[in-house]
Amino acid sequence: MPSVSASSPPTRIKLWGTRGSIAVPGRETLRYGGNTTCIELRADGELIVLDAGSGIRPLGVALNQEFQERPINLSLLITHAHWDHIQGFPFFKPAYDPKNEIRILGFDGAGATFREIITEPMRSPFFPIRMRELSAETEITKLTEMKFSLGKVNVHAAFVNHPGVCAGYRIFTSTGSIAFLPDHEPYEFFLHAARGQPLTPEQAKEIATNEHARLVQFLRGSEILVLDSQYTDKEYQTHIGWGHGSVSSAVSLALEAEVQTLLLFHHDPSHDDKVVDTMVESARELATKSGRPLQVTGAQEGRELLVEAKTVVAA
């Protein structure tokens, strides 16, 4: 992985979509945002986009305004095939400009190849323009390795606990690393990894323990962890098995992995800004009680963060 240098330009992260499941625009969601999952990351000369929920549409508008006549060359990493992570790509303006180059990467899903996952939403009768008709030079790359590079940026992938096939990514830059797990349910509460196989309670507990330990090691020491925290702890009790985490499970994982900053992510569509405020405050109280130096914040659409040589600051 790249070495950390105080002289390296900061890694810049901008949140374009923080909501889970479905977009919910309106006055009640203005501060944390109503668009579904999309994050922009710039580091070491690379432009990387994480997921293509509805938030990728305003990102595309902003990129066109910034680059104007210059070509846009970017990599789009997809975590999984659920609609709130791919629904925005047909409305991504840079994909319709022939001077641009877009590389889309992800893993095969449950019962579908990665190419099918990306192209299906852009075929009749779902959309009037097919993927192959896009003007930009578009390359669809099926990932087969858990470690790969995007220019000078190294990326590690790990499968997480969510229905179907879902990956999380940890991106290593010259100033630190960012982990992106927008959809994940704690292994200790529910085990999607069994995929319907009959397991004894002892077998399930052993697998869950091992998978959790693997994930902690995958995340250990991240400067920023963007993590699914869709439910309050009370809500989670009636949503076990839905593939998402809670406030306390997010804080617990972040503490165990010794990350620097936790971004509560994948806000529930039924949660307005006031509810998310309460969840953030609850998470901060848990972090404070632990006595460990964990910074907690709620992911806000439009917010920018900088990673400057092991330090996370607001832009």
Image (cartoon, rainbow, N blue to C red):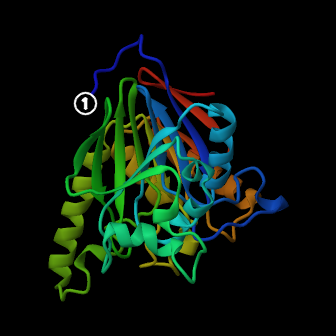
Q: Nearer the viewer, residue 246 or 122?
A: 122
- Count numbered badges in the picture: 1
| Residue corresponding to mark 1 | 1
In this view, the residue in front, 241 or 283, is: 241
Check disc 1: other Cα within 10 Å, few if <14, some if 14-19, many if 20+: some
Q: Is residue 269 left or right of residue 4?
A: right
Residue sitting at 67 percent across and 66 percent down? 23
Give percent across and percent down for residue 110: 31, 77
Camera sees residue 81: no
Q: What's the residue at 42%, 16% (across, down)? A: 8
Classify residue 89 by image quadrant: bottom right
Instruction: Determine whether 99 is above or below 133 in the image.
Output: above
Residue 270 is situated, as x and y percent measured from the top left of the image, at 69, 71
Picture coordinates of residue 269, whole percent (x, y): 66, 69
* Label 1: which secondary element: loop
Report the quarter where the C terminus lies: top right
The residue drawn where x is 34% and y is 34% is 172
Instruction: Farthest residue to the right: give it.
Output: 27
* Residue 198 placement (x, y as % from top left): 18, 89
Badge 1 amino acid: Met
Residue 38 drawn above or below residue 240: above
- Quadrant (top left/top right/bottom left/bottom right) for the N terminus: top left
Looking at the image, which residue sits at the far top? 7
Of residue 259 and residue 52, the one placed in the foreground of this image is: 52
Q: Quadrant of residue 112?
A: bottom left
Q: Is residue 196 visible?
A: yes
Position of 74 with respect to 206 (left or right) is: right
Which residue is rendered at x = 60% and y = 53% of the image?
Answer: 56
